Image: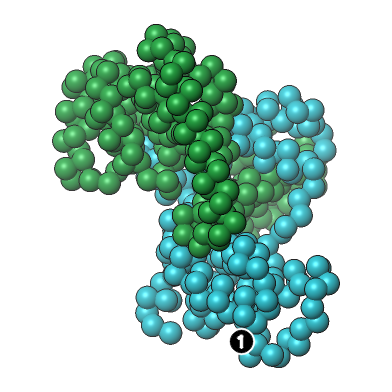
Amino acid sequence: MATEEENIELIDKYLRQEMTVAERTSFEKKLAADATLGKQLELQKDIAKGIEYHSLQNLKKSLRQTEATIGTPKPYKLYWKMVASFAIIAVVGYLVFSLTSTSEQEIFEKYYDVYPNVVNPVSRSATDVVRNDMRLYEAANYEEAINTFNQQLKSKPGNDTLIFYLAQSYLALDDVDKAITNLNRVDSTSVFYEPAQWYKALALLKQKKPEKAGQQLDEILKSQSSYSNKASKVKDAL
Amino acid sequence: MDKEEKDWIRYIKEGGNKELSFIYKSYREEFLLWSTSNYHLQEETAADIFQDAVITLYWNVKQEKLTELTSSLKTYLFAIGKNLALKKIKKDKKLVIDDEVTGLNASVTYSEMPLEYDQRHRIIGECVAELGEPCCSILSMFYFDRFTMDSISRRLGHKNENVTKTQKLRCLQKLKKLMQKRSLNVDEI
């Protein structure tokens, strides 16, 4: 009897229309005889539809952000922008005045964790080859990891994975300036964009720049990133 | 149509948000000028409609409903934009517009992007967002962008496809748990 994983693989192939005619006929026969497989197919269709909904929402969000950067400001918008700017200045002034360096450091320590190695986890089957740079990173040997990342970036200058983990390594070594420089280099289309934005907010806290950290957290909240919950908590703490 | 325009289908098929943003910026101003003067739309409404037109183009390419452009990219986009604008105006019952007035290419065919999703699918979408990275991207790349496992594996810098496959399965399990938490039945439908 096929495992759930095997069934999922078959269903995906069926839904993506990647089966040969023979495979399709055989699958449809199985489907008619196996009610569980039928239920799994319906579930998988629902999941695909939910992912489609999520992806379309994300595209819309991304184009709205593009529009926000190029849209023509209207007079009434300018007025509200001025009001908002004064309000921000007032809030920022209050934050600068009221926050002590200890509280920023405390917040940073509460929320900061080294980003896990999601690229090539070391704890896998012994037959897989582990990337040396990620092995160093996972072993917290950040100096060596930085050397390896920088070396690779010479031949792959825009590689977002290398840039992101380079930034993480700098942050782990408290080299916050270099961490922020590299986090800024993670493109908005990268899968690491959302975590990069979050770590930038934390890095700004580490630099004792609460006003900039606040602005960065606002950006995260506005973009409805998967770090929104955490960003909201840090904002409250600030 | 020049060669570069033809290549857009491939760029969109293989790419992501970056291409979409580029297309949006390239034709936005012209569309806004055209739609605000022809249909008297507010600039914000026109921009919103054009965003939907660009996403519709993207969706048609990803769903393999559009495999080759028979007109220029601009004509295709403007035809979608025009239809969306007319729908919006009809819905708001603001104006009665003669379809022929604008003289745009009406022969462009495309599939409408689904705008309405039922509650179950919207909740699943919210659970996907809750998954965070890299699950969100892996599932999106596989089920929405329809990239191959090999392509996803390369994009994520994985050593081989098996790593990606395993991660995708784990992400699906995680997603099902979140769905259960939201009281969605994942055993029987």
Residue at image coords 33%, 35%:
A183
Please tell me which residue is depicted at 61% across the width and 32% down the height of the picture.
Answer: B130
Q: Is residue A122 above or below residue B78?
A: above
Is B59 placed left or right of A146 in the picture? right
Name the spot of residue A157 as percent of width and height, x first. 23, 46
Q: Is residue B142 visible?
A: no
Is A160 displayed left or right of B36 in the figure?
A: left
Among the 4 quarters of the image, the one containing residue B36: bottom right
Horizontal and vertical percent position of residue B82: 66, 77
Image height check: is B5 above or below A90? below
In the picture shown, does residue A112 fall above or below B2? above
Q: Which chain is cyan?
A: B
Q: Residue flagged by tag 1: what amino acid is it?
A: Asn
Q: Nearer the viewer, residue B163 or B61?
A: B61
Which residue, given by chain and number where applicable, does mark 1 sit on? B105
Taking depth in this image into account, of B76 and B45 the one nearest to the observer is B45
